Amino acid sequence: MDIHEIIEQLPHRYPFLLVDRVLECEPGKLIHAYKNVTINEPFFAGHFPHYPVMPGVLILEALAQAAGILSFKTLGEKPDMTSLFYFVGIDKARFKKTVAAGDQLHLHVEIQRQFRNIWKFEAAARVDGEIVAEAELMCAKSNLVRTPG
């Protein structure tokens, strides 16, 4: 999937869209995507100016966005004004190495289970084949009710 297809599958937009390309997506099973981390990222101005490092919470968010794509693809749906996936839990998060400008952050997410509207994923982020972060993620599909006014 290129960026145009990703934009159809995620409600996020710049500067919060953290998936650049999907290399593999097997609905109901797994996704492999990546984020090109550049020095132009807005978070590098403050984290940290003397040694730019991607914040760990944004690595987890990138993994959650990949999980969102996988979820919508599994359901055969696209996000719209009435439904979204929300990040509802993180377990066993570990950060093993820093992610810096110039890195290509590979996002590997597998569905562990789904029950009603709750999804659990096993996720790992890698740079140059080495795990930089891993976690168990939980997301929930929410059907939004929009009221007039």
Image (tube, rainbow, N blue to C red):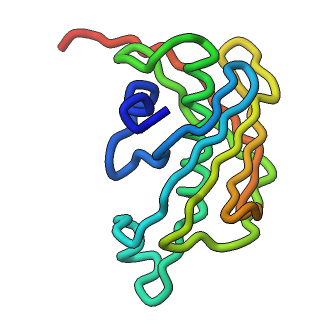
Give the residue displayed 75% in from the left and 34% down from the top: 110
Give the residue displayed 32% in from the left and 48% down from the top: 14
For residue 121, side relative to residue 2 (left or right): right
Question: Quick one: 137 or 102, which is closer to the camera?
Answer: 102
Give the residue displayed 41% in from the left and 45% down from the top: 17
Q: Residue furthest bottom?
A: 50
Quarter-wise, where is residue 76 in the image?
top right
Q: Position of residue 131 (x, y in %)?
A: 76, 61
Q: Position of residue 63 (x, y in %)?
A: 61, 45
For residue 130, side relative to residue 1 (left or right): right
Q: Quadrant of the C terminus?
A: top left
Taking 40 as reference, is 78 above or below it? Answer: above
Quarter-wise, where is residue 10 in the image?
top left
Give the residue displayed 39% in from the left and 72% down from the top: 39
For residue 41, side relative to residue 65 (left or right): left
Q: Position of residue 101 (x, y in %)?
A: 48, 72
Q: Residue furthest left?
A: 149
Q: Position of residue 93 (x, y in %)?
A: 75, 55
Question: Quick one: 23 or 116, which is closer to the camera?
Answer: 23
Taking 83 as reference, is 63 above or below it? Answer: below
